[in-house]
Image (tube, rainbow, N blue to C red):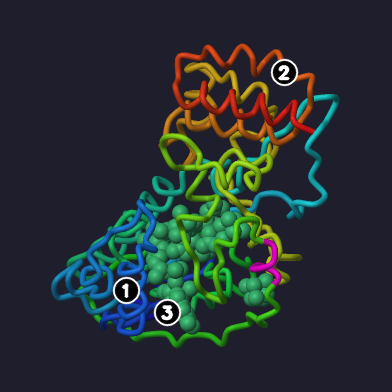
Amino acid sequence: MNLKQEVICFAKKIGFDRVGFTTAGPFLKEKEILAEKKARNLLSPFEETNVELRCDPNKILPGVRTIICFAMGYLVEPYEPEETCQDNINGDLLGKISRYARVKDYHFILTKKLKAIVEFISNKQPGTFKIEVDTGGLMEKAAAQRAGLGWIGENTCLFTPELGSWVFLGEILTDIEFEPDRPIESRCNGCGRCIRACPTGALMAPFQINPNRCLSCITQMRGFIPEEFRRPLGNRVFGCDTCQEACPHNMNVKIPNHKEFKPQFPLETSLAKLAKLNKHDFDKAFKATAAGWRGRNVIRRNAVCAIGNMRDVRFKKLLEELIDDPSEIVREQAKWSLKNLTKM
Ligand code: B12
Ligand code: SF4
Ligand code: SF4
């Protein structure tokens, strides 16, 4: 077994579902796309703005020769499309927290595993290494595509053949040279279901997303939710899975059931409880997830917006109480929701 095969075996043993190797050459096509997006103000507030850095792996790790790409699936229960989920059980209004944010924060889980792989390689061959999971400069979907992990669909997500797009991505950049893998053929059939399903028109055209209209971004933003996105938010409390749920390649996928990704709370959670979430309960339920980073009041604000969208007059008293909440964003949202509740 050569080192590449050993790395693949070790990575699979510790829980990765797909591993691919690619060269460290610059991402030229992506550089043009990114520069245009930046010029049109179409970058999210959460991403690195240095286009040169993002598209040239050598600027991330000088002397890099290989990018090793990893994908780990996060579904733990049979996939249930949005339409079959209920928004009202036993009189309780339910809010939706997207699948990626219900599980233990993937940044920590993947980074820990990637560190173990770096150690595994270093023991066999010395080299320099740099780990990336989400927050670094590298364009992870573009790297994964080039390394043969999957294809990018029209909703801009990276799809794998067995697990669909329900995967997290992480990479190791290294100055060790490995034989690169080849990209695989795209199975996106251009059906446009993802684009039609998007509630805000964030998918402007095939493969083109305006992150500032994406509910995933909007549920994570600070401050007030812009008026035009309040109704489309529906009962989403954090993240949005809609364009992924619409894709035929995400149905009947393998459920990897990794123990690390045991959900911290159900897909749908009581909106009233979320709206009143105290610090203790927030820390207990959210702190360890990717939904925790923006703090308690952003979750509460979103839940209050969702209550307004449900237009259930039984929640009038709760909203009236929240008008005096210490948090400005919760107060403002409660006023809107109360108005929305009584407006028929
Ligand atoms: C910024 C960001 C966001 C932003 C913007 C999303 C985006 N698509 O760019 C927001 C906040 C909206 C977001 C949302 C989500 N994100 Co996010 N996000 C990122 C981040 C940090 C950068 C993404 C990026 O490089 N964008 C740059 C632009 C240029 O890429 P792009 O618009 O997607 O365009 C690509 C293609 O569509 C194509 N393209 C673009 N324009 C054009 C034009 C033409 C004509 C053609 C042919 C092609 C083409 O080329 C581009 C390069 O590959 C990555 C982590 C990372 N460091 O890479 C995670 C990452 C992409 N996110 C992730 C996740 C899980 C999500 C959500 C699913 C979370 C959720 N459930 O709410 C949603 C999915 C929304 C969606 N439909 O994409 C995962 C994706 C896993 C996967 N299987 O794809 C990543 C990789 C994090 C990780 N390490 O796992 N995210
Ligand atoms: S995640 Fe939701 S809002 Fe964002 S592009 Fe997909 S469907 Fe649209
Ligand atoms: S829904 Fe259709 S167009 Fe969208 S990513 Fe899936 S296969 Fe491609």
Q: Would you say the magenta stretch is mainly helix, strand or loop? A: helix
Q: Is residue 235 left or right of residue 152?
A: right
Q: Nearer the viewer, residue 209 or 277?
A: 209
The label on residue 316 is: 2
Q: Residue at x 35, y 63 (%)?
A: 41
| Contact flag, marks 2 and 1 (Cβ < 8 Å) | no
Q: Residues within 10 Å of mark 2 (few under 14, many from 20)?
A: some
Q: Is residue 49 above or below residue 328?
A: below
Compute the Cα span from label 3 to label 1. Answer: 8 Å
- The kind of secondary structure element at disc 3 is loop
- Mark 3 or mark 1, which has the lower sequence index? 1
Q: Is residue 139 left or right of residue 91?
A: left
- The kind of secondary structure element at disc 2 is helix
Magenta stretch: residue 165 in it?
no
Q: Is residue 254 above or below residue 36?
A: above
At label 2, which amino acid type do we have? Lys
**Cβ(mark 3) to ligand 1 < 8 Å?**
no
How far across and how far down the image is residue 197, in percent? 69, 62
Closer mark to the observer between disc 2 and disc 3: 2
Q: Nearer the viewer, residue 81 or 252?
A: 81
- Mark 2 or mark 1, which has the lower sequence index? 1
At label 3, which amino acid type do we have? Ala
Image quarter of the C terminus: top right
- The kind of secondary structure element at disc 1 is strand
Q: Which residue occupies the extreme right position in the image?
A: 90
Q: Which residue is mark 1?
A: 67
Q: Which residue occupies the extreme front position in the image?
A: 343
Q: Quadrant of residue 81?
A: bottom right
Image quarter of the N terminus: bottom left
Q: Which residues are the magenta region?
A: 193-197
